[in-house]
């Protein structure tokens, strides 16, 4: 009997949200969580997000959908936009959990994750990088993920919030 896979997803929430929005649709987070579980045996899906006090309904919805939320304090940038840089937290969590998962799925288009992706790939721990959008995906990330990169532009029908 084949052992059931135990894969973890590490999701850059802001990158995912903005990437999907740039294609003109909205992600159904419940469907996405179910998709990760059924298609890729993702038992734990970390969702890294900047904490904004007024966003409690969103956080509750994400938790109900089955995500483990990792909050980052936010700071306003020069233009008054809120910024919660989660990169270091995502990398740290992926490394702390390294012995606990079979393979990792990194959901982001951000080239800052190339070192993590390279390390996971070299240690046969990278299932793939799931990039929201081909056009915005870092060339460095594509290079390190090699053949293990998938794009979400063809998942609209399955995962769109209607």
Image (cartoon, rainbow, N blue to C red):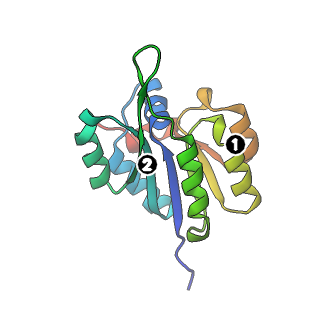
Residue 128 position within the rendered picture, expressed as x and y whole percent measured from the top left:
63, 52
Residue 130 position within the rendered picture, expressed as x and y whole percent measured from the top left:
57, 45
Q: Quadrant of residue 151?
A: top right
Residue 45 position within the rendered picture, expressed as x and y whole percent measured from the top left:
45, 56
Helix, strand or loop under label 1: helix
Q: Which residue is mark 2?
A: 47
Q: Could you tell me which residue is drawn at 69 percent across and 56 percent down?
A: 120
Task: Give above or below for 19 relative to 40.
Answer: above
Q: Which residue is mark 1?
A: 114
User: Is 7 placed left or right of 28 in the picture?
Assistant: right
User: Is 159 placed left or right of 106 in the picture?
Assistant: left
| Depth check, front residue: 66 or 41 | 66
Q: Report the number of numbered marks.
A: 2
Q: Quadrant of the N terminus?
A: bottom right
Q: Residue furthest bottom?
A: 1
Residue 60 position within the rendered picture, expressed as x and y whole percent measured from the top left:
25, 48
User: Is 53 placed left or right of 117 in the picture?
Assistant: left
Q: Could you tell me which residue is drawn at 47 percent across and 37 percent down?
A: 16
| Depth check, front residue: 16 or 60 | 60
Look at the numbered discs 1 and 2 and tell me whether their residues touch, using CB distance below 8 Å: no
Q: Quadrant of the C terminus?
A: top left
């Amino acid at each position: 009997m084949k052992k059931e896979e135990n894969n973890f997803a590490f999701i850059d929430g802001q990158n995912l949200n903005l990437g999907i929005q740039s294609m003109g649709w909205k992600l159904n987070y419940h469907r996405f969580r179910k998709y990760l579980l059924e298609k890729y045996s993702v038992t734990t899906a970390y969702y890294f997000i900047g904490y904004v006090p007024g966003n409690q309904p969103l956080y509750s919805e994400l938790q109900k959908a089955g995500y483990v939320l990792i909050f980052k304090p936010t700071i306003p940038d020069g233009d008054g936009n809120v910024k919660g840089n989660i990169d270091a937290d995502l990398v740290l969590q992926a490394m702390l959990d390294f012995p606990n998962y079979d393979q990792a799925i990194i959901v982001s288009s951000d080239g800052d994750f190339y070192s993590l992706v390279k390390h996971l790939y070299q240690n046969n721990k990278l299932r793939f990088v799931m990039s929201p959008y081909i056009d915005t995906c870092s060339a460095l990330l594509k290079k390190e993920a090699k053949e293990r990169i998938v794009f979400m532009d063809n998942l609209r029908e399955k995962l769109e919030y209607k």
